[in-house]
Amino acid sequence: MFTPSQMRTAGFGAFGASLLTLGLGLFGGPGAGDLEYRLDVKPTVMTVAYKAYGNEDAADGKYWLARVVMENDGESALEDVAVSYRIPDYLDWTTPQTIEEVLPGQTRVVPIYPKLPTRVTSLRSRTPSSLEIKFAWNDGQEDHEKIEVRQFEFRGVNEIEYTSLAADEMLTWHDMYDNAEITAAYVTDEDQVVRQYLGEISETMGGMPICSTGEELAKTMESIYVYQVGTGMTYSGNKGVPERLGDATSTVQSVRLPRDVIYQNSGLCIELAMLWAALGQGSSAKAYLALVPGHCFPVLEANDGTIIAIESTGIGGSNLGGTMKFADAVEAGNKQFNQLMRGEIPGVLIDVVLHQGRGVRPPEFEAVNLADLARLLDERTAKALAQGGQGQQQQDTQRQQDVQRQDDTQRRDDPQRRDDGNVGSNWQWYQVPGLNATVPYPQGYTADTQTVQQLQQHIPAIQFMASDPRGEASIEIYAAANMTARQLMNDSQNLAKQMGASVSYEKAESIVIGGQQAALYPYTFNIQGQSMSGGFYIYETSAGLFGFAVGGTGSSWRNLGGQIAQAVRFGN
């Protein structure tokens, strides 16, 4: 029993406690925590390097798929903040990453490195997907849960996206190749196809030494080069095209794995360089890939530190009018390498071993029938030996004869492809679609239809392009209805701007194209201190325009452009 005094005391105490509780609620008691967050999700994933996206140590962690930036804007601590995610059809819900406490005013970042399945490398073109991110937390008073969804795309396994930087972050040429280390994922010396190809070279060439010294490295490289020339491997030209990616503008290029180059016996400059790097590492050399404006070439290092670069496109092709001798290919490669190392030309040197060791690893390989591969390589070798494929002079003569026969056949089948006194016999002709006009270009130039298709997204008037084997000169052909020269040049300037470059035009000059009065617009293309000059040769009519552009180093383009302008034919 309580006495009245005790009851009064107890009542006062209860009343006081209720006042305290009310006071805390009305006058400064801590409120709940408030979770604010931002999701940064990359617009694309390069599937060839899917292992790097699942490795927080790869390239210092730069290949995250998403990044969650969380901040507590409330008054109480957030407790047990958990982040989990999934990629439907590719990845189930992950085990949550949990942060025990986020204090008021505190910011925490949770990067997402998804462990993607190998089957993403079966994708051959851009494929839409989505990332679902689940948040769970306690704000100090109650539990919460929320799911956010963001879209992204998987790139085809053969696509390289050279940079992911936003346009306003790209200040130098090197920024355009911010993702250059991804090329290390293409150096597949562990692939059984590459190993068998290397074994065939060794057997055919009478064995290949371990590259302990510079002399042994040179012998190995010569064996590879002579074998490729003898068995008909060819160089084919292609250039990357700027593509808009969210806030970034990136040069994207379709690049095949070395196994594909082996099977098809042909490759772009970067594809040949990657194959060489894989063969070099398979021979115990250390491999590098040198990326310079418009080109890529391999560099190999012997165990004693001797370094040899090579112009791997020197193997030429049936449409390039012959090959370089091995010594000349090495001289050309070393010249470019020395210019790069002295800073005379911009570029990036990719240490393949370094980046592969840091997580930029090649993808898993689909199984192939090695017996069929062996038969294919044996047939190539037998054909080369039967034709005397080891003789460099005989190879060059044969290739030149093949080119001449091909050109004779084309002229016989197509009267528009003919010799012309203005340009000589060693030229090819292009029939402009929709126009009764033909344009000549040098026999040794390589046509590039894939790049034309990509460029038409930016410059609709472009119909054709071809470049010389070294990528130092090119010709482009344009035709469009209801378009002016100024519109065409504006399109070119806008494309250059997306590449981080600039194009400036000089005063128009009066010229004649195929007997018609026309105009020449000289231009200068600048990118990070490097420049190339050229000219737009434009014939305008009330129905639209026709013309071509010639570009190159120095002023040699004027001579070439003048010859082409005189030889252009309208009508039969």
Image: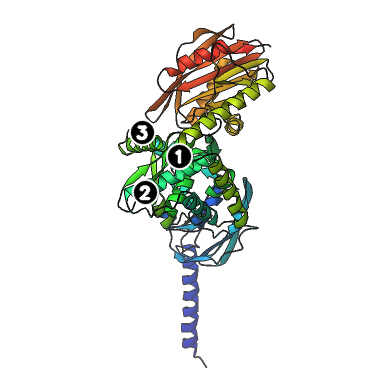
Residue 217 disc label: 2
Three-letter residue code for mark 2: Leu
Reading the chain from its start, which is encountered first: label 1 or label 3?
1
Q: Residues within 10 Å of mark 2 (few under 14, many from 20)?
A: many
Reading the chain from its start, which is encountered first: label 3 or label 2?
2
Q: Which residue is located at x 41 percent, y 57 percent?
A: 357
**Location of residue 437 by image quarter:** top right
Kind of element beneath mark 3: loop
Q: Which numbered mark, 2 or 1, is in the foreground of this view?
A: 2
Three-letter residue code for mark 1: Ser
Kind of element beneath mark 2: helix
- Whole-angstrom CA distance, mark 2 to mark 1, is 15 Å
Residue 166: x and y in percent read 47, 40
Q: How crowded is mark 3: few (under 14 residues within 10 Å), some or many (20 or more)?
A: some
Residue bearing mark 3:
345
Residue 500 lies, with reference to residue 564, above or below; the image says below
Q: Are marks 2 and 1 in contact (CB under 8 Å)?
A: no
Q: Which of 146 and 432 is in front in this view?
A: 432
Residue 230 appears in the rendering:
yes
Three-letter residue code for mark 3: Ile
Q: Which of 499 and 517 is in front in this view?
A: 517
Residue 431: x and y in percent read 65, 20
Residue bearing mark 1:
312
Residue 316: x and y in percent read 50, 34
Kind of element beneath mark 1: helix
Q: Which residue is located at x 50 percent, y 86 percent?
A: 7
Q: Nearer the viewer, residue 497 or 35?
A: 497
Residue 444 lies, with reference to residue 260, above or below; the image says above
- Look at the image and tell me in which quarter the C terminus lies: top right
Reading the chain from its start, which is encountered first: label 2 or label 1?
2
- Whole-angstrom CA distance, mark 1 to mark 3, is 19 Å
Residue 121 lies, with reference to residue 524, above or below; the image says below
